[in-house]
Image (cartoon, rainbow, N blue to C red):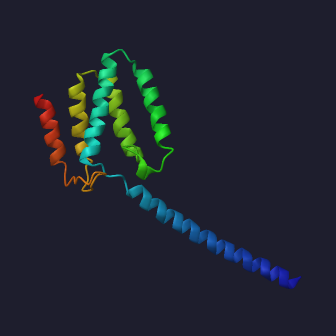
Amino acid sequence: MRSTLNTTIEERMKLKTLAKQLTLAAAVGGLAHVTAAHELTRTECVEGSDFIRHAAMSRENGMTREDFLERMQSDIRAIQAFPAQLRWFVQDEEDEELLTSAARLVFDVPQNPETHQADFLAACAARVGSTADASGESAPNSAAVTADVDSLSEQ
């Protein structure tokens, strides 16, 4: 009986140590996950701006705010079923918020589609990182996205 009791105490101590190690690993891993936000590329910003332009075109063709945002949220939920690295744009909460905020503005502060597109590009430019997109296109800074905004303004 004493042997069983000692084994149980040893097992509990090992479990407590393991629990502390797992808690520490989760905390460190969780912090690393929180700080490693997805850096948008120039191409993602341009594609996102196209989406926002199409949202404004949908509004102009009679789609209601509620219908558009409901469909958009449904699509985002479907996209989120895939691993983040396989998703377009909504790889993290910041991406989702950037896109949905711009979509809300399309209906709340109506402007022409090109203006909404340019506004989105400008907002997205601030988040462009120094990563390469899926096509290998490098986005060294936001200057290229800013040039895209300028070219849209001239249209």
Q: Quadrant of residue 13?
A: bottom right
Q: Quadrant of residue 154?
A: top left
Q: Is residue 45 visible?
A: yes
Q: Is residue 108 visible?
A: no
Q: Position of residue 61 (x, y in %)?
A: 33, 16
Give the answer, above or below, for where 130 lies relative to 66.
below
Residue 71 appears left or right of 134: right
- Residue at (33%, 19%) from the top-left corner? 59
Quadrant for the C terminus in the image? top left
Residue 79 appears left or right of 135: right
Return the residue found at the far right: 1
Q: Position of residue 20 (x, y in %)?
A: 59, 70
Return the residue found at the far front: 135
Give the answer, above or below, for where 28 lies relative to 3.
above
- Residue at (48%, 47%) from the top-left corner? 82
Q: Position of residue 129 (x, y in %)?
A: 26, 53
Quadrant for the N terminus in the image? bottom right
Residue 93 appears left or right of 117: right
How many numbered marks have been drawn onto this rendered protein structure? 0
Give 28 or 106, whichever is nearer the viewer. Answer: 106
Give 142 or 109, whichever is nearer the viewer. Answer: 142
- Residue at (72%, 74%) from the top-left corner? 12
Residue 58 appears left or right of 137: right
Q: Quadrant of residue 97?
A: top left
Return the residue found at the far left: 154
- Residue at (27%, 56%) from the top-left corner? 131
Give the answer, above or below, for where 37 lies relative to 111.
below
Q: Position of residue 6 (x, y in %)?
A: 80, 82
